[in-house]
Amino acid sequence: MARWDPNNSGGMGTLRSEIAQALDRAGPQFAPMFRAAFLPGRGAREYPLTNLYDDQNSIYVEALAPGADPTSFNISVAGDTLTLSGEKPRVQGEIKPEAFHREERAAGKFVRSIELPVDVDGNNVTAHYKNGLLLINLPKSEKAKPRQINVQVA
Amino acid sequence: MAEKTVAATSGKQPVATGRETTRDQERYIQPPVDIYELPEGLVLLADLPGVAAGDLNVRLEDNILTIQAKAHHAVNAEPIYREFELVNFFRQFELSDEVDQEKITARISSGVLILELPKAEKAKPRQINVQVEKAAA
């Protein structure tokens, strides 16, 4: 009868270490999901959700952030990466957990980085918060703007 | 406060007198809500991003509280990347007699609807003082 050493035999030991390795590999990838778990109902998603719009002069970022504290917003542009952070406060006042009939809204601090598709002029970024939507206006840098080229007719 | 979804048309309207119609060809989503209870009444918070005060319709009919709202995007430009769409919001709740329906107030700020539903007088908790009689000497 062969002796079975769980750590150092073929079969089971190899399987075990393979599983451990697989979990290690999966770790960093799954971590954001757990980190976002304090946003109930939004768990596995990036928060806030954003739309990008484009016109001749600017890129617009529209973020879905109802009920956020307007003074908590922190928006910065570094290179072609836009980082926005803020906080959506929980219900105001001390409310006992048992007083809740329903609790579906997300709450907590958030931070999100977005890679922008074109070069922007980081000094002239403006942001407005209205009706729960955060709109960031990022003017394109001069070289990223489309240029009209006149065709010379010979 | 039970959740309730009834047909958008009320039963008092004449039925099938003309052409048959269906509900608007619109899509709705249910906004997430928080409802909590205070001694004075219930408070309902609903996330309604993109909804201005004029686009919000809160009505009460036959004990059914209906929240209906139209949402609009903040910008009019060519979309290049989309994670969310704003569609209309719709959600209904059935109120019990414990809510004083005359005194419901609603306000919206930063895309959050705050509905205050005060309790009717009879439903409020009352403290009853116990009178202690002095024992006869």
Image (spheres, rainbow, N blue to C red):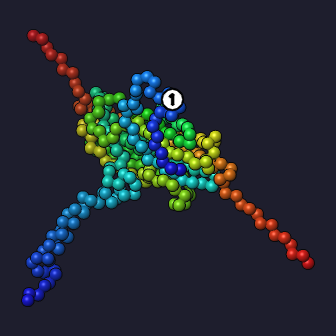
Specify whether A119 is left or right of B133: left
Q: Residue at x 65, y 53 (%)?
A: B123
Q: Which residue is mark 1?
A: B13
Q: Residue at x 36, y 46 (%)?
A: A48
Residue B84: percent from left, percent from top: 33, 40
The quarter of the picture where residue A16 lies is bottom left
> At label 1, which amino acid type do we have?
Gln
Residue B109: percent from left, percent from top: 51, 40
| Quarter of the rendering occupied by the C terminus of chain A | top left
Specify whether B46 is left or right of B124: left
**Above or below — where is B133 with respect to A135?**
below
- In-front residue for pair A147/A25: A25
| Chain name for mark 1 | B
The quarter of the picture where residue A137 lies is top left
- In-front residue for pair A108/A15: A15
Q: Is residue B52 visible?
A: no
Residue A99: percent from left, percent from top: 54, 58
- In-front residue for pair B99/B38: B99
Q: Residue at x 14, y 77 (%)?
A: A13
Q: Residue at x 37, y 41 (%)?
A: A63
Does dot 1 land on a helix, a strand or a loop?
loop
